[in-house]
Image: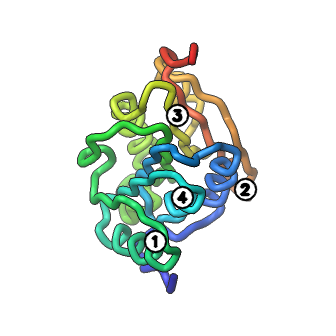
């Protein structure tokens, strides 16, 4: 796939933890959104497992990189330039989001800087998510101990959060949260 531009988020431990979490799910035939796709690895992994994937990113360069990778792998994705859900009219069975989550006072690097507390994009994502999940759909959201995941859990009572993957790192603990709307829990 060639090298990844420094402007595009390159896969790291957080990405591979997300892949581990996705590997536990059946995605074949599911309508999947890889939001903030970066290098495209999450959406491409799902497409290789026969999911119908839309990959979206605010950065056009990330979308071009993902398109090139899809061509090399021989898979098709719908590609959308979008600031979170702004250009996403559809609903999905599975929404994937590995956000910029590092606490920062400003945004020097949009691929990792998550604002004060590291939760700016996580909050926006969760505010907009309900309109983009199909009945019974779930989201996988990566969080870090650096951005106080319990604050997020406690703020959104309309969601059920459960940890489906976890990895201790040198300076943080990463978690992949499965997010479901509480009104879907009977499904």
Q: Residue furthest bottom?
A: 2
| Tag in front: 2 or 4 | 4
Measuring 60% from the left and 57% from the top, which residue is drawn there? 49
- Marks 1/3: CA–CA distance: 24 Å
Mark 2 Cα shell of 10 Å, populated few (<14), some (14-19), many (≥20): few
Measuring 40% from the left and 65% from the top, which residue is drawn there? 109
> Residue 185, located in which quarter of the rendered image?
top right
Measuring 44% from the left and 64% from the top, which residue is drawn there? 38
Asked if labels 4 and 2 touch by Cβ distance under 8 angstroms, the answer is no
Mark 3 Cα shell of 10 Å, populated few (<14), some (14-19), many (≥20): many
> Residue 8, located in which quarter of the rendered image?
bottom left
Taking depth in this image into account, of 175 and 170 the one nearest to the observer is: 175
Which circle's residue, 2 or 1, is located before the other in the chain? 1
Please name the residue that numbered disc 4 is placed on: 42
Q: Position of residue 61 (x, y in %)?
A: 33, 73
Q: Position of residue 116 (x, y in %)?
A: 42, 45
Please name the residue that numbered disc 2 is placed on: 169
- Please say if 186 is above or below 2: above
Q: Is residue 95 rendered to the left or right of residue 127? A: right
Q: Secondary structure at mark 3?
A: strand
């Amino acid at each position: 796939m060639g090298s990844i531009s420094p402007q595009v988020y390159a896969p790291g431990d957080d990405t591979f933890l997300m892949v581990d979490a996705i590997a536990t799910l059946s995605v074949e035939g599911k309508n999947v959104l890889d939001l903030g796709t970066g290098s495209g690895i999450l959406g491409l992994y799902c497409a290789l497992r026969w999911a119908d994937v839309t990959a979206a990113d605010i950065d056009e360069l990330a979308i071009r990189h993902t398109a090139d990778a899809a061509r090399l792998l021989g898979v098709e994705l719908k590609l959308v330039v979008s600031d979170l859900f702004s250009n996403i009219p559809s609903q999905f069975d599975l929404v994937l989001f590995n956000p910029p989550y590092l606490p920062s006072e400003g945004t020097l690097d949009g691929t990792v800087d998550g604002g004060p507390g590291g939760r700016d994009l996580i909050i926006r994502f969760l505010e907009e998510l309900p309109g983009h999940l199909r009945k019974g759909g779930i989201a996988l959201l990566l969080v870090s101990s650096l951005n106080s995941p319990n604050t997020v859990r406690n703020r959104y009572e309309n969601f059920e959060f459960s940890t489906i993957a976890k990895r201790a790192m040198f300076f943080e603990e990463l978690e992949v949260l499965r997010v479901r709307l509480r009104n879907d829990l009977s499904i």
